[in-house]
Image (spheres, helix red, strand yellow):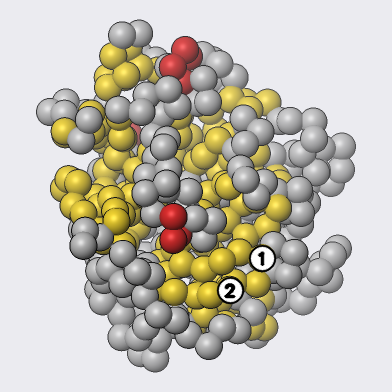
Amino acid sequence: MRLLGAAVATAVLVLAPSAGAGTPAPGVTAELVERFATPTFVATAPGRGRYLYVTQKEGTVRVLRNGELLDRPLLDISERVADQGEQGLLSAAFAPDFAESRRFFVYYTASRGCSPAGGCPIRVDEFRTRRRDPARALRGSRQRVIAIPHPEASNHNGGTVAFGPDGKLWLAPGDGGGGGDQFEHARDPNSLLGKLLRIVPRPRRPGYRVPASNPFVDAPGRDEIWSYGLRNPYRFSFDEELSAIAIGDVGQGTREEVNIVPISAARGAGFGWPELEGDFDFPESPPYDPPAPPLSPIATYANPPGGPASVTGGVVAHDPDLPQLDGRYLFADFFAGQIISFDIDLSANTAGDVQALGVGPISGLVAFASGLDGQLYVLSLNGELYRLEPEQG
């Protein structure tokens, strides 16, 4: 992801192998909910349907209660966060039993331990809210879950932490930065960078355990790894109905890609970077003999001529107020700001009936979210949080 400021791209997104973005989906509009200071992610908390939580890049988590922005943040760890360029407080996740445990987790680049090259450690920390107030973190509740060295460059930090349908905690750090996987992390089984990771945080104490079902347990490679071969998987999400994970992986300079695969199919698998950039051979890749063919993206699109591109992975829609989008995957490009949806055929690994939503463009589109009742939200790094709603006739 490139978080250096938003711009409108010079071309409409076109998916391959589809012919184009199709006709706009009818009856969808984006309604402004609230404005924030450089927001990066929006999350919901199980059992707390009145609340939305928005992370801000500099290190705070703001709270909306019944659509109203509260004056005091849930959390302020700005003194712990490095937020230059692509760095910052990048996401939050709330435990499946949050209503009882009050546990939530934040993903950020830490200000302590940064290297002269500008790289800073990637951290996930646990906090708890006050017993009777889900809008305030409990002072002194912080526990370190995982810290991943990221010394060589400041970019490609990934950005998402999320609970999967299995109740485990998942995260996806980028490949360590630079260009062309120059530090050779994405395929290195002994590095956590450029990977999809699956862990179980230890409640109310530091650290985590590794599920015994992870693919590299009792095999060469780090036990935390579920998948490898990712470049900068800034946004990913799960869909319980499909038992699938959807990953938007930011490309080098030619292709952007979306991967939607069954969670089981991603177990121990590679996503192709750096031998492939999307569906193109990457010519600068060092020789590599993969243990199995890499998973193919369900959709790719080209960088516009002379302009930047950076895919923002999204969500599968299940909003009862927008039945025309039900079961379709929504995503966008950070620079173009055009929201695209398509039908998912997992068995054929194809994106069908590609459509533009016809809202926006929303430049700096940095995250999608699905509320507890299926409501669809989109967030711009420029500050705006929108809800997708039926267009009134």
- Residue 14 appears in the picture as rendered: yes
Farthest front residue in view:
393
Give the residue pinned by disc 2. Answer: 352
Picture residue at 64% right of the left edge, 83% below the top: 280
Nearer-the-camera pick, 290 or 53: 53
Which residue: 59% across, 19% down? 202
Q: Residue furthest top?
A: 131
**Number of other residues with Cα within 10 Å of mark 1, as a class: few under 14, some 14 to 19, many 20 or more:** few
Circle 1: residue type: Asp
> Decide: marks 1, 2 in contact (CB < 8 A)?
yes
Report the quarter where the C terminus lies. bottom left
Vertical position of residue 179 compared to residue 291: above or below: below
Q: Gap between marks 1 and 2, in whole Å? A: 7 Å
Q: Is residue 312 left or right of residue 216?
A: left
Residue labelled with disc 1: 345
Kind of residue indicated by mark 2: Gly
Q: Earlier in the sequence, mark 1 or mark 2?
A: 1
Left or right: 53, with 222 as reference point:
left
Tell me the SS state at disc 2.
strand
- The answer to whether 326 is drawn above or below residue 358 in the figure is above
